[in-house]
Structures are given as structure tokens and as C-alpha cells.
Amino acid sequence: MPGINLPLSDIMYYLMTLLVCSVIHEVGHALAAVRANVRIQGCGLFVFGIFPGAFVDLPTEHVSMLSAWQQLQVFCAGVWHNMILAGTAALLLMMNPYFGSLMYQHDAGVTVVSVDQNSGISGPTGLVVEDQVSAINGCPVRNEEMWRNCLVAVASKPPVGYCVGRNFLELENKQVLDWTVGSQDSNCCGNISESRLCFVEQVRKHYYCLPVRKMLTEFSGTCNSSSPCRNAELACLNPLLDNVTRLVSVNREGRDSVLFVGQPAEIFSADTCHCYGGHHSS
């Protein structure tokens, strides 16, 4: 019933389907009657409340003069046609993945369909509707399950470090002070810029205030205590964050990555993503 077990937003689809099924049903009766040489007295459409329907008027005396088998054909033809219609619809439904694969890619990423505007992941530089996400912190995202698994992995594993060139550190260090562990204030960036974040090099016990986007654009390698940077010209830097806060890079197709500093659970609760299929021509 509409509004009870059928969303009111789908009422037009339901009524159109009901009308088509009714017409096909009555066409079945009419065809069976014509085949048995029974004259059709009339046919038409009607509306019962809000429900559309169709009818075929057959002369009762002519139908009663038919053999039992012919009468059964006339009476059951409507149901038979509806069964054929339902079978055809079920076949088309099962063939949808095949037909869709001709026009769309499969498991090519996820697309954002809604974003909580009060969350930290929204805004001009955040995720927006129709963004096509392909990776989270280097974790490939191909479907909704991988989207969830990548966020869980980012939240549950220790923060990842980044292999950054020492020449880059020296150049950026000319613009901000280089802090040490012995400093009274380990927040090396202070209020310098929202685009910068404090990183610590555990080996030399140095803090650096670095432009995050520029750093991640130039250096994509990662490191940790068990897998340090292979090149001596690279320093392994970890973002200076608490135990539950992470630096998350969300890669988008055709747009800059979204950089988010906070709890990964906020991304999960703020965004609704669905499997994305991009046109082959795009």
C-alpha cells in the first residue's frame, strides 16, 4: 500500500506499472477470445480511487458455448500474459550488469552522493557531491566495501610517516623556525598557516612546519619504524598528532586530493558514497 509498504515518492512508478500490467492482462483475454472466434463487445480504462485499471467486455453466452479447454484459455490468458511480462522483466533485471558494462566501468571507485555540511570534510576544499574517490592514504578504493575498509585501516593502524627530501626541509625551514624536542612548545606551526602542519623527524628529534599539500605532491613515499626511507637523502617524518587524529589524503579523479586532519570516523559518518561507474568516454 502506498505510504505503508511503498514509499510515497515511488507512487508514480507503481501506478504506471499497475496500468501496464492491467492492459497486458486484458489484452491476453482479448487475444484468446478472438482466437476462439468470440466477439469483443468493448474495452477501456478506468480509475478506482487512485489505482488505474483496464477491462475487456466479452459476451458471456458466447464464452459459455466454447469447449472447456477454450474457456480455460480465455480465462487464464490474462494471467499467462502477466507471467510472461514478469519473466521478461526479471530477465532484463538480471541482464542489467551486462548492459551496464557496455556503457559504464565497474569497480572504478566510489562517488559521493551526499555530504554533511557541518562536518570537517565539507567546504570549498573538502569533498563535494559527485566527487569520484579512488584512494585513501594510498589505499585503493574501488567500491563501497573498499571505501569502508580503507577508512578502518587508517583509523586502526599507527599513523603513517612520509619520506621527505632534506633539500625540501632546508628550503621550507627558511620560512619557519626549526624546533627541537627540548623546546617548550612542540606546536611548531602555531598560527602560521592553516595549510601547514607540524611534523617530527624521530631520528634527529627535529620538528618541521611544512605545507602539507606541497609536501605530499612532491613526495609520495611512506615510512614507519620497521620500514624506513631507503634513500639517505630522505627523512622519515611523522605528523605531530594525538593517538586518534590522522592526516588523511582522499584522492579524487580529476581534482586535487582532499586533505583532512581529524578522526577518520568523521569522514565515514559525514559522507554517503556509492559504487561509481564512469562512462567509458569520460
Image (tube, rainbow, N blue to C red):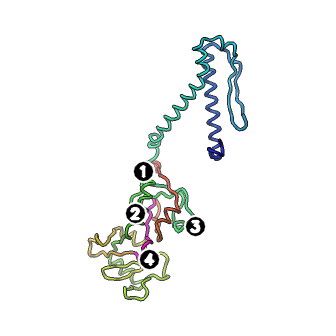
**Side of 251 relative to 227 (left or right):** right
Residue that carries the numbered disc 2 in the rendered image: 153
Q: Which residue: 50% across, 58% down? A: 131
Looking at the rendered image, the disc whose residue lies closer to the viewer, 3 or 4, is 3
Alpha carbon distance from label 1 to label 3: 29 Å
Q: Nearer the N terminus, badge 3 or badge 4?
A: 3
Q: Nearer the N terminus, badge 4 or badge 2?
A: 2
Residue that carries the numbered disc 1 in the rendered image: 107
Residue 248 lies within the magenta run: yes
Alpha carbon distance from label 4 to label 2: 22 Å
SS at badge 1? loop
Along the line of sight, the residue nearer the viewer: 39 or 5:
5
Query: Dot 2: few (<14), some (14–19), or many (≥20) neighbours within 10 Å?
Result: some
Query: The magenta stretch spans which residues?
Result: 239-252
Looking at the rendered image, the disc whose residue lies closer to the viewer, 1 or 2, is 2
Q: Are marks 3 and 4 in contact (CB under 8 Å)?
A: no
Q: Nearer the N terminus, badge 4 or badge 1?
A: 1
Indicate the quadrant where residue 185 lies.
Answer: bottom left
Residue that carries the numbered disc 4 in the rendered image: 197
Q: In which quarter of the image is the N terminus?
A: top right
Residue that carries the numbered disc 3 in the rendered image: 118
140 is higher (above) or lower (below) than 179: above
Q: Do the residues labelled 1 and 3 touch (CB within 8 Å)?
A: no
Could you say where residue 147 lies in the image, as x and y percent from the top left?
44, 58
Residue 148 lies within the magenta run: no
* Amino acid type, mark 2: Ala
Q: Do the residues labelled 3 and 2 touch (CB within 8 Å)?
A: no
* Amino acid type, mark 1: Asp
Along the line of sight, the residue nearer the viewer: 43 or 245:
245
